[in-house]
Image: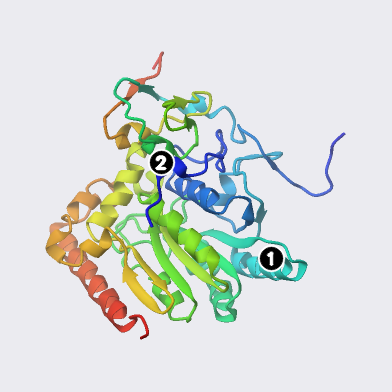
Amino acid sequence: MGLELVPVSRPAPGSGGITGTWRTLRPVVDLKKCIDCGICWLYCPESVIDWEKGQKIKIDYTYCKGCGICAHECPTKAIEMAPEAGL
Amino acid sequence: MTVRIDLLPKTKYVVPGNSACAGCGMMIGLKVLGMALGEEAVLSIPASCASVVQGLGPKSGVALPILNVPFASAASVATGMSEAFRQLGVKGQAVVWAGDGGTADIGFAAVSAAAERNSDVLYIMYDNEAYMNTGIQRSSETPKGAWTTTTPTGKREAKKDVALILLAHGVPYVATANIAYPQDFYRKIKRASEIRGFKFIHLFAPCPPGWLFDPSLTVEVARKAVETGVFILWEYDNGELKLNPPSSALVDKSRRKPLVEYLKLQGRYAHLSEDQIKQMEEEIDRKWQFLLRFAQAARPRA
């Protein structure tokens, strides 16, 4: 059954559910304006931004809660917070 | 030492889809802790937002080994872990990740005892200035004047300076850090983990629902706290106390931004009168003078 005697949780995405449904605003990236600095990746409290220098950023919308820190901190304003469809 | 962003580890120590509020400041700190210590860190977490954000079992939203322990016991548990590491020859750093309530109020006796024993523990107090996960009740770290649900007209008492209290314990390393300056926090964790004995870091971590500001402003609020002089970045290492940038460039009062730039971002300060803000400014300046005298007294030994 895979049951454990000790109550242990193991790291896995979605421990709080599909948190992308919390979002009212959606971060939309304009990669042409992106200077590949990594600041949004560094500050994202949810770790939903993937980044490697030279490859620019990618956002995981399944779990992004839409806080907007990335858009606020972006030095070139390459991220815009747009209302989610249906809101 | 400057820390290059692109060279920081890309492992996700904060796992997407956890139970933290949108824009949680503490999660930025937890990310940096993971980057700095990786699998070497074993966390002792008392009742706090940090125990809630891990989410529902059998999943965990934080990819670090964690013991969730009773409120007042975090520092004692970490002492036990560090002793076990030593006796078993395991390379590990016992870390306490506790809130301001679990440190300055409820856990204080255990913190003080672990510091007095000089246990090999890295104690990080993430400070969101109230009991947030239970519904924003005031703590001894809530600043004077701030609204909470138990101080509806603003707190009357001053904020307790835990870092200076720990400094007075004679421990080898004490520092303050701020989530708006992750590289500085990263460097301080790295430095602290090199030292055997009790290390204390006071991490400033804004809370959007508790401080009543938009979640996109978490880093902005944290940065303004430093730029206006409300929160001072400093480090006590090897008998020397020094200010860290950008606080080190703000000793001259005229170089700090006006306090209102910090206060106006947050609903918890919306009720303050001009007189009260002036009084707050004076208190901040007194705090600076007090700390600078400490810095002068704790100079490197020749």
Element under disc 1? helix
Label 1 vs label 2: CA separation? Answer: 31 Å
Between B54 and A70, the residue placed more toward the observer is A70
Q: Residue furthest bottom?
A: B302
The chain carrying label 1 is B
Which amino acid type corresponds to the residue marked 1 in the rendered image? Met
Residue A14 is situated, as x and y percent measured from the top left of the image, at 60, 32
Q: Who's the residue at 54% across and 64% down the image? A: B193
Judging by the rendered image, the residue that carries numbered circle 1 is: B81
Q: Who's the residue at 49% across and 59% down the image? A: B189
Which quadrant, please, contains the C terminus of chain A?
top left
Between B290 and A58, the residue placed more toward the observer is A58
Q: Residue furthest top?
A: A86
Residue B137 lies in what quarter of the image? bottom left
Q: Who's the residue at 17% across and 59% down the image? A: B256
Q: Who's the residue at 57% across and 74% down the image? A: B197
Residue A10 is situated, as x and y percent measured from the top left of the image, at 70, 41
Position of B85 compared to B195: left or right? right
Q: Which mark is residue A5?
A: none
The chain carrying label 2 is A
Which quadrant, please, contains the N terminus of chain A?
top right
Which amino acid type corresponds to the residue marked 2 in the rendered image? Tyr
Q: Is residue B3 above or below residue A12?
A: below
Element under disc 2? helix
How busy is the neighbourhood of tag 2: few (under 14 within 10 Å), some, or many (20 plus)? many
Position of B256 compared to A2: left or right? left
Between B87 and B179, the residue placed more toward the observer is B87
Q: Is residue A75 above or below residue B173?
A: above
Q: Which mark is residue A43?
A: 2
